[in-house]
Image: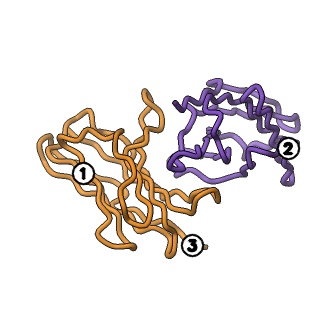
Chain colours: A purple, B orange
Amino acid sequence: GEDVEQSLFLSVREGDSSVINCTYTDSSSTYLYWYKQEPGAGLQLLTYIFSNMDMKQDQRLTVLLNKKDKHLSLRIADTQTGDSAIYFCAEEVAAGNKLTFGGGTRVLVKP
Amino acid sequence: DARVTQTPRHKVTEMGQEVTMRCQPILGHNTVFWYRQTMMQGLELLAYFRNRAPLDDSGMPKDRFSAEMPDATLATLKIQPSEPRDSAVYFCASGFINHGYTFGSGTRLTVV
């Protein structure tokens, strides 16, 4: 079955890099996603990676996927105060293309 | 930019009343998800549709919740009767398989 786990909290200094980690259990995942949620708002799609890739870079965002260990990470370079938010990883599985989310990682960027 | 529109944005209702939440997916999207978000449970998948057909509603309490897509431009989530434990933010998302999904701004439901 699907199970997606994330650490609860990350604190980082402005200008440093942030790394948010995620593990998942379903080996039939087709795509893996990172979403950002700011207070009072919906979820905003940041980036996604196909399960047969191991890395994707998009401006300040780098996604790394270790399919063997079922581990996904999101690196944010030069973290800004506007990056403070909750970050969710999600997997889309082959059966029915169901989308399952982790519990979210709250990122706090300190000046 | 195309948006997923959810109405109402906020709803306060008394226990036992019927609540209907609406979602207008982005035109052309063939997949619609309903999620519920609470502090304790995080994001829970309630139901989802593809080409208007329900695929999975196992996350929904069947005795009081129902989800429908009467046409391609409207998805509804109904709770009857509502209970205080249903208080949450309800999100709708639409998209295509393996292309990411766009979320609406949510309906914040408070049942008193």
Q: Can see residue A33?
A: no
Q: Check if mark 3 and mark 1 are on a common chain.
A: yes
Determine the secondary structure under disc 2. strand
Q: Which residue is mark 3?
A: B2
Q: Which residue is mark 2?
A: A55
Q: Amino acid at mark 2?
A: Met
Q: Dot 2: few (<14), some (14–19), or many (≥20) neighbours within 10 Å?
A: some
- Tags 3 and 1 in contact by the CB under 8 Å rule? no
- Report the front residue among B43 and A13: B43
Residue B41 relative to residue B8: left or right: right
- Tags 1 and 2 in contact by the CB under 8 Å rule? no
**Label 1: chain letter:** B
Residue in view at x 53 percent, y 45 percent: A95
Q: Which residue is mark 1?
A: B66
Q: Earlier in the sequence, mark 3 or mark 1?
A: 3
Q: Which mark is residue A82?
A: none
As measured in the structure, the alpha-carbon distance from the residue carrying label 3 to the one carrying label 1 is: 27 Å
Residue B11 relative to residue B45: left or right: left
Q: Amino acid at mark 1?
A: Ser
**Label 3: chain letter:** B
Q: Dot 1: few (<14), some (14–19), or many (≥20) neighbours within 10 Å?
A: some
Q: Can see residue A86?
A: yes
As measured in the structure, the alpha-carbon distance from the residue carrying label 2 to the one carrying label 3 is: 28 Å
As drawn, the residue found furthest toward the left would be B16
Residue A20 relative to residue B94: left or right: right
Up-down: is B44 above or below B22? above
**Label 2: chain letter:** A
Q: Nearer the viewer, mark 2 or mark 3?
A: 2
Q: Position of residue B68 (x, y in %)?
A: 29, 60
Q: Nearer the viewer, mark 3 or mark 1?
A: 1
The answer to which image quadrant residue A10 occupies is: top right
Q: Amino acid at mark 3?
A: Ala
